[in-house]
Image (spheres, coloured by chain):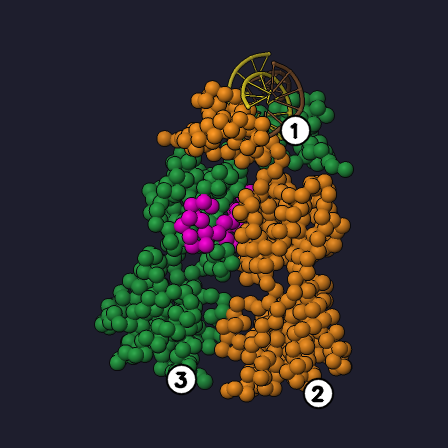
Chain colours: A green, B orange, C yellow, D brown
Amino acid sequence: MKKDKITIYDISKKLNISAATVSRALNNNPKISEKTRALVAKTATEMNYKQNRLAQALKNGRTNNVGIIVPYINRSFFSSIIRGIEEELNPNGYHVIICQSHEEEENEIQQLNTLLNTQIDGIFMSVSKTTQTTDHIRKALEENTPIVFFDRKLEFPGVSSVVLDDFKAGFIATEHLINEGCNRIAHLSGDINLEIYRNRFEGYKSALKEYNIAYDKNLVIQTSSKIESGIQAVTQLWELENKPDAIFSAGDYAALGAIQELKNRKIKIPEDVCVVGFSNEPFTKYMELPITSIDQTPQMMGKIAAQVFLEQVKGNQTISIEKKVVLAPELFIRESSNRKLLKFK
Amino acid sequence: MKKDKITIYDISKKLNISAATVSRALNNNPKISEKTRALVAKTATEMNYKQNRLAQALKNGRTNNVGIIVPYINRSFFSSIIRGIEEELNPNGYHVIICQSHEEEENEIQQLNTLLNTQIDGIFMSVSKTTQTTDHIRKALEENTPIVFFDRKLEFPGVSSVVLDDFKAGFIATEHLINEGCNRIAHLSGDINLEIYRNRFEGYKSALKEYNIAYDKNLVIQTSSKIESGIQAVTQLWELENKPDAIFSAGDYAALGAIQELKNRKIKIPEDVCVVGFSNEPFTKYMELPITSIDQTPQMMGKIAAQVFLEQVKGNQTISIEKKVVLAPELFIRESSNRKLLKFK
DNA sequence: TTGTACGCGTTATCAT
DNA sequence: ATGATAACGCGTACAA
C-alpha cells in the first residue's frame, strides 16, 4: 500500500481554490486573506501534506543543502568542526553533505565538482595538503557558489575563512616553555608547505626573539603527524652536543612519540624536558602524564564558519561579504610542561 | 558575469536535433545511433554541459542522497562508521547527509522527518539511547524508504541491520581475563536498557559459567560512559570483603577511570588486577599503560551497511531484502591485562 | 532511430 | 485577494 504523495494540487481541489493560492497561503504571502491562509494551513496538516523540496529547489535554484570537504571525517579535529557546522546550520533548515578528499588534490577537485553539480547552496572546505592548483575553486566562485574555508585556507577576493591564529599559538606555547625556565627549546614542525605550520614556526621564532633567546636551526625538525616521527626527532635531537630542555611540537602525535622516546631514555618530564603538543587531541588529557597542548576550538570554528555562511546568503545575494575570522588559540597546561605542579607533590 | 547553465535544450538546438534525443544519448539509451550518441557526448563536454540532478531527481524520484542519523558525529566510533559508509557509497554516485540526534528521541524523530522530506533514497541510523517509540521508523518504511540500522538496531520485518556480536565480545573479553588467571572478575556494565550492553553482560556471564566461575552480582556495577563513573565503580567494588582481581568494562572511558582509581590506590595493573575496556578508542593504545579493548571495526561496519543498502536498491525495488549482519569483535590485548608480557621485562 | 508532447511539484508573472 | 498559465530541466510514452 503505497501512499501517493499529496501536492498543493490536491489541496486546491479539495478547497475549490487554485493551486497558486494554496502555494501563496503556505508561503505566508502577505496578499492572501487571513481566512484562506488559515483554512489552507489547516487542511494541509489534515491531509498530511509535505512540501516537495525537490520541486521547490528546481524552481528557485536553492536546495538548502551545503557541502563540506575535509581530508578525513573521522579525525577528531575535523569531525568536531563538522559538528559545529551542522548544529549551527540545521536550525536554519540546511542539511550538510560531507565528502572526503583523503588529502588528495584529485579527490578534492572531483568532490567539489560533484557537489556543484548537486546544486548545493554553499561549500565549506579545508584544502588538502597536496592541493597545488586552484581552478576548481575558481570555477565554484564563477558559479556564484559561496565558499567558506576553515583551518586551511586559500586567498581569493570575496571569499571568507575561519582559521586559528597559528602564529599566536606558536608564540604562547613557546612563551609558556620559556616561563617554565626552558631556554633550549626544540620545535617539531609540520609540513612547512602549509601555511598553518609556517605560522606556528614563526610564532615560535618570534617568542624566542622576544625573550632574547638565540634561534638555533639545529633545534628545528620537520616531522609528520605520526608517533614514529616524534621518536625519530628526539633521537636526532639527542645526538646534539647541546641538548634541548623543551620541545614544542606542531602536532600531538609527534609530541606523544617524543615523550615515549624521552621516557625510553629515562629523561624526566617535565623536570628535565618540558613538552607541548598541538591540537588538544582527546588522548592528551587522558595520559598518565597528561600533555600540554594548544586547543583549536574546532567546534567553535565550525559554528563560526556556519555563521559567516548564513550572513552571506541571508544578505543581499549580489554582494559577497569577505570575512576573515581568526580564532584565538587556548593553551591547556598539563603535567608534561608544568613544573610548578611538582612542588605540591 | 554569470554563466547561464546550459541544458539539453541548448545542445539540441546547436545540433538541430530534439532534446529528447540528447537526453537519450546522454543516458546511453540503446536505441540511439552510435553516431549521434558520440556527437552528443562530444558537444556536451565541449559546451561544458552538466546534468541538473535536481530536475532528474524530481523526474524519477531518486536523489542519490542518503541520510545518516547518529547521536554525535564527533565520536570516534560514529565518525568512523560514517567514513566507511561514505567511502563505499561515493563511488556509486551517492552523497551522504549527516544529522545528529544528541541521544534525544525528539531530535531523532525530527531529523528523520526532514530527511524524508528532503527525498533521500535511504537512511542509515543508530537509534538514540532515549528512543522509546517507533512511529517515525514505521512512517519511513511506509514511504518505502529503506533503512539500515547499525550498532543500535530496532527489529522490523524487512529491515536490515549491521551490528557487532556483543555477546561474543563480552565472552571473549571475560575468557581472556580468565586465561590470565583471574577469577573474581567485575563487570562495569553500560545502560542495561540498551540491547548492546545487555548482550555484553550476557556474554560475560556465559564465559563465567563455561569456566565454572560463580556469578556474583556484587561484582556487576552499572556505569555511564564517563571516567568518573569508572572511578566510582572501583571505589564501590573495593569496599567488598572479597575484592575483584579483574575488571571487564563495557566502555573504554569507565575502564580508564577504573585504572586511574586503581593506580591511586597503588594497586598494580596487570599484576594485581587486569583491566579490559570496550570500543578500542584511540586513546587506549596511546597510554603509558595501554588498555586492552574490544575493537568494533566501525569503518568496516559502515562499509557493510552501505553494501547492504546498495544491494537493496540495486535489486528489484519491490522486494525488500532483510539482511542481519553480525560482525565479529576483535580483542586487542595490551598491557593492562597482559601478564605474560611481564616475564620479558 | 528520432521527434512530439506531457508531467514531475512548485513558484512567479500576469491578469482579473 | 485570487486564478490561469508558464517555467524550472529532465525523462519517457507515444507516435512517426
Number of the front mark, 3 or 1: 3
The secondary element bearing badge 1 is classed as: helix
Same subunit, labels 3 and 1: the answer reads: yes
Number of the front mark, 3 or 2: 3
**Which mark is drawn over residue B297?**
none
Q: Along the line of sight, which residue is nearer the eye, B94 or A15?
A: B94
x, y (%) of residue B314?
64, 43
Q: Which residues are magenta?
A: A82-111
x, y (%) of residue A120?
50, 40
> Looking at the picture, does residue A54 appear above or below residue B255?
above
The secondary element bearing badge 3 is classed as: loop
> Looking at the picture, does residue B93 appear above or below residue A251?
above
Q: Are marks 3 and 1 in contact (CB under 8 Å)?
A: no
Amino acid marked by disc 1? Ile
Q: Are marks 3 and 2 in contact (CB under 8 Å)?
A: no
Q: Is residue B172 visible?
A: yes
The secondary element bearing badge 2 is classed as: loop
Same subunit, labels 1 and 2: the answer reads: no
Amino acid marked by disc 3? Lys
Judging by the rendered image, the residue that carries numbered circle 2 is: B241
Judging by the rendered image, the residue that carries numbered circle 3 is: A266
In which quadrant will I find the N terminus of chain A? top right
Q: Residues within 10 Å of mark 1 (few under 14, many from 20)?
A: many
Residue at 76% across / 78% down in the picture?
A: B209
Q: Is residue B91 left or right of residue B241?
A: left
Residue at 52% across / 67% down in the picture?
A: B282
Q: Quadrant of residue B319?
A: top right
In the rendered structure, which disc, 3 or 1, sits on the residue that comes first in sequence? 1
Residue at 75% across / 77% down in the picture?
A: B210
Judging by the rendered image, the residue that carries numbered circle 1 is: A8
Q: Quadrant of residue A186?
A: bottom left
